[in-house]
Image (tube, rainbow, N blue to C red):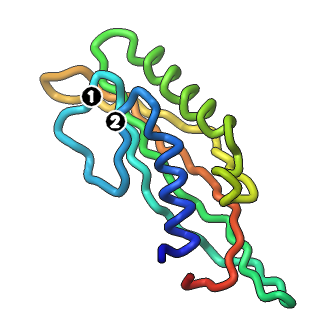
């Protein structure tokens, strides 16, 4: 039986799957970026939980990360903005991931342009997404 942490991360990944970009989890950056873009979900860290007693519960603010990358010879900024907006819309459609989280909150991205020798430059950002959830066991 998967842990609460894994269940939440799998639901988060599933929420991103319908997007036009290729969505991966904990993979290395591929040599080629799809024309529609690339999103890599990094599991991140659950951090120190707040603990309540009676009943014993661990309340996490898990910081997962999305690496978002676009490579386009023309209109890179527009394509990047469209992809970021689609991530925001996907998360806003269900901020609880079907009731698995208390709340899902993305932070604003800080994008960078990365030159690539002999190819179109990359536009990339890391978006931290805070997953608020509760579990009865820090290992379960």
* 72 sits to left or right of 86: left
Q: Is disc 2 placed on a helix, strand or loop?
A: strand
**Dot 1, how many residues are within 10 Å of its Cα: few (below 14), some (14-19), or many (20+)?**
some
Image vertical order of residue 57 relative to residue 118, above or below: below
Q: Residue at x 64, y 58 (%)?
A: 131
Label of residue 34 in the image: 1
* 135 sits to left or right of 82: right
How many numbered discs sit on the rendered protein?
2
Mark 2 vs 1, N-terminal side: 2
* 72 sits to left or right of 8: left
Q: Residue at x 64, y 45 (%)?
A: 106
Q: Residue furthest top?
A: 74
Q: Residue furthest front?
A: 1
Residue 102 figure quarter = bottom right
Q: Residue at x 24, y 20 (%)?
A: 120
Q: Is disc 1 placed on a helix, strand or loop?
A: loop
Q: Residue furthest right?
A: 54
Foreground residue among 25 and 63: 25
Please say if the residues under marks 2 and 1 sit with CB atoms less than 8 Å apart.
yes
Foreground residue among 55 and 67: 55
Horizontal and vertical percent position of residue 118: 13, 23
Horizontal and vertical percent position of residue 135: 68, 76
Horizontal and vertical percent position of residue 132: 70, 61
Image vertical order of residue 13 relative to residue 34, above or below: below
> Which residue lies under the disc numbered 2?
22
Q: Residue at x 34, y 35 (%)?
A: 22
The alpha-carbon separation of the residues under discs 2 and 1 comes to 7 Å
């Amino acid at each position: 039986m998967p842990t609460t942490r894994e269940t939440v991360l799998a639901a988060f990944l599933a929420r991103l799957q319908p997007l036009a970009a290729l969505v991966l989890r904990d993979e290395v950056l591929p040599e080629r970026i799809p024309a529609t873009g690339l999103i890599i979900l990094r599991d991140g860290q659950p951090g120190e939980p707040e603990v309540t007693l009676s009943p014993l519960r661990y309340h996490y603010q898990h910081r997962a990360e999305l690496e978002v990358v676009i490579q386009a010879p023309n209109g890179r900024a527009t394509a990047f903005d469209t992809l970021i907006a689609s991530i925001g819309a996907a998360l806003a459609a269900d901020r609880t991931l079907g009731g698995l989280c208390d709340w899902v909150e993305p932070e604003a991205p800080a994008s960078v342009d990365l030159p690539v020798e002999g190819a179109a430059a990359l536009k990339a950002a890391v978006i931290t997404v805070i997953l608020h959830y509760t579990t009865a066991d820090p290992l379960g």
